[in-house]
Amino acid sequence: MSKTCQQKKNICSPKSTSTAFLEAKAQHYLRPLEAKLLGQIDKRLVATFSTLFRSILLFRNTKMGLLLSELGGYIAGHAHAPAGTKRLSNLLRSNKWSASLVDAFFFALAKQRINQLRTLGKRPMLLWDESRLEKPESWFVEGLCSVESSKGKRLTKIKKGFFKPPSARICVPGFQWTGVLLSALGKVPSVVQMSWWTTRGKYKEVGTNIMYRMLKALQTSLAESVLHVLDRGYATSWTIEWMLHFQQDFLVRWKKNQLLTHAEKGSKQTHLLARSCPAQGHKLLRDKERKLTKHVSVGWTAVVHAEFAHTTLYLLVVRDKKHQQPPMYLLTSVAIDSIKEAWQLVHSYMHRWQIEQAFRAGKAELGMESPRLWFWQSRLKLLAVVALVYDFLLSLLRNWPGWVPLFLKRWVPRTGNRHRNTSVPIYRLRLAIANALMVAFAITQNSG
């Protein structure tokens, strides 16, 4: 059949229903954004924008996935790859649109989903965290700043039988990255904001400004607050100050050496104050990241921060019965009246791991560290399109959970009990999409 299609161009190969479904959903997902782009740039650049979105879905390569010279072959066909690269360059260099258009698109979708979650009786959560994009071999790219290398930290961990690694921090050129996801317990997350910023040069930014702008926008556009879930990097007084100022609820993992005040115990460090907090509930929890089942207890007590003496906060102490890990301290502004509410907050913090997976998928699967663009604004536009691709993948998992297993069985079949009993990672979904789209791309190339 393939040989017949190559020799007789008037014979069309039957189109895969899964490929048609993907293209229809991608077109539906991009339609509101394309409508806004049409008011700012030429329709040919809008067509390039849509083709770039599909090309990133198609081309899987961590080291070269976002090189314009590689993507150009999938935009205009490999025989006209230079022309496709030129079209991409024209799109990213255009001064008539910016990455903020994609941020506004994400925020509008997030507001709609927050209302939907509240209708279902779910508590909306915004999952915050920071990471970095490392460019260790770069030097003259616009916007580079010094970032701590997570790869260097991982590769220099002490391993039995090997030499002792260096003890000092390893810093390389790169960019800072702040991500925010919207989710609820038992739900697949969606992207609210992906921001890349630098601490040097013309486009210098302060990371705390990103949270300030997001909280201000939430207060002005939503009638009710959402729960902000944050890691220890946000365990500071300014986080509490801004959350209280913008009337938002928060759940932050608190550091053990920071001071809190108890009505009876006085002002003490968190880990000393937690010693007198008894366990009020026990449960078996599954730690998916470490693949362990733990017997966990939780207790809570009302505390006050020294700088906000008129606001009652609650400290949750989560302990591992076998002491495999040190206790975890969670500080929240949500009033805790029952053991059920306490466990919901514990599970909410555990759900924060979704943002860590988003960072990993962006680097390991979507190749966010591979672009070789000189100019800062062009880089932000390309990374914004990649964030759109990631949110589209999440929307497939969220909106069509029954279709995804059938699609994976057709395009990335796997054998063994492990693949039948474990949750499907987003990597396999993208591999299946790439396989399905590659068939349609190959037929187009052969028929041309």
Image (tube, rainbow, N blue to C red):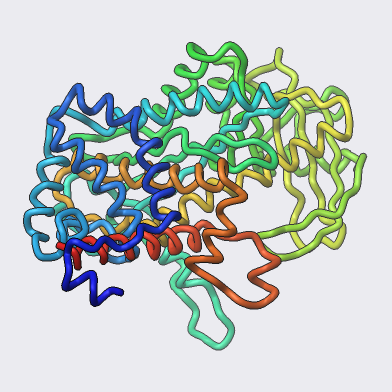
420 vs 53: above or below? below
Q: Nearer the viewer, residue 48 or 368?
A: 48
Question: Residue shown at 27%/33% (left/top)?
Answer: 99
Q: Position of residue 202 (x, y in %)?
A: 18, 35
Does residue 286 appear left or right of residue 184 in this picture? right
Q: Position of residue 83 (x, y in %)?
A: 7, 54
Q: In which quadrant of the rendered image does the N terminus lie?
A: bottom left
Q: Is residue 169 visible?
A: no
Residue 79: quarter of image: bottom left
25 vs 32: above or below? below
Q: Nearer the viewer, residue 14 or 53?
A: 14
Q: Is residue 50 visible?
A: yes
Q: How many marks?
A: 0
Question: Residue shown at 60%/48% (left/top)?
Answer: 401
Residue 82: quarter of image: bottom left
Q: In which quadrant of the rendered image does the C terminus lie?
A: bottom left
Does residue 33 appear left or right of residue 361 in this picture? left
Q: Position of residue 409 (x, y in %)?
A: 56, 66
Q: Position of residue 246 (x, y in %)?
A: 55, 15
Question: Residue shown at 41%/53% (left/top)?
Answer: 362
Q: Nearer the viewer, residue 65 or 407?
A: 407
Question: Residue shown at 49%/50% (left/top)?
Answer: 358
50 vs 39: above or below? below
